[in-house]
Image (cartoon, coloured by chain):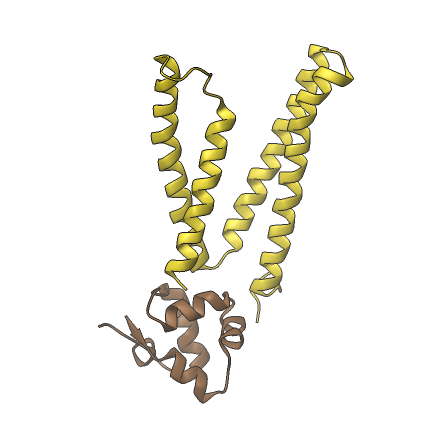
Chain colours: A yellow, B brown
Amino acid sequence: MGNDTGMSWQQRNTRNVRRLGMWTAAWLVSLASVFFGHKYLWDGNQALTAGVIAINVVLGGFMIWANKQHLQGLDELQRQMQLEAMGLSLGVGMVLGFAYSALDATGVIPFRAEISHLAVIMSLSYLIGLAIGVRKYQ
Amino acid sequence: MKNRLKVLRAERDWTQADLAERLDVSRQTINAIEKGKFDPSLPLAFKAARLFKLTIEDIFQDE
């Protein structure tokens, strides 16, 4: 049994996960290339760095599109689980992000609050949210 | 919401995976519906009713 694409849910999901993985990997490699290339390959040439950043943004656009396709390809329970996990991730990211920023701005912590720390917190809370969803609907 | 999916599936000797494939959803979704942990959408309920050649009320009952 399949939908209008002629693919079963499982085939569609496998394709979407692979596509999302591919674009995410491309985006990550391009992001790493910005920092690595700027420092070691083109010796701080700003035009080249700007060009690679532009490529990174374009690849990021494809990653967003692939993620949207992935979400649309999920069935209704999985979409519900994704929604709950993303809601938790967004909430935790906002609350802890602002708190972390306040700690930095007021000098309570001796180091700078980096955006990468927020990305790690949001990723972890998303994974925890997914694990909670899997357990809840098991 | 209570449902008779497990009974209807067993009558046809289908596994959860078989029913999931016929309804184009994951096996986890079938399991969650059978256990009453997740209520299906109206389109999915209609799809199940068509598959079993029953009405929605024959399969799903409000508790």
Outermost residue toward the front in this view: A110
Locate residue A135 relative to residue A50 in the image: left or right.
left
Count of numbered tags? 0
Q: Nearer the viewer, residue A94 or A68?
A: A94
Outermost residue toward the left in this view: B63
Q: Is residue B12 visible?
A: yes
Above or below, A47 against A30 in this view is above
Residue at 61% in and 37% down: A62
| Quadrant housing the C terminus of chain A | bottom left
Above or below, A95 against A67 in this view is above
> Residue A60 in the image: x percent, y percent?
60, 33
> Residue A18 in the image: x percent, y percent?
65, 50
Residue at 40% in and 65% down: B43
Above or below, A14 against B56 in this view is above
Q: Nearer the viewer, residue A96 or A38?
A: A96
> Residue B27 in the image: x percent, y percent?
49, 68
Locate residue A117 relative to residue A34 in the image: left or right.
left
Residue at 35% in and 18% down: A102
Q: Nearer the viewer, residue A53 or A130?
A: A130
Q: Is residue A80 visible?
A: no
Outermost residue toward the bottom in this view: B11
> Residue A73 in the image: x percent, y percent?
53, 55
Locate residue A120 relative to residue B43 in the image: left or right.
right
- Quadrant location of residue A49? top right
Residue at 35% in and 71% down: B35
Above or below, B56 against A54 in this view is below
| Quadrant housing the N terminus of chain A | bottom right
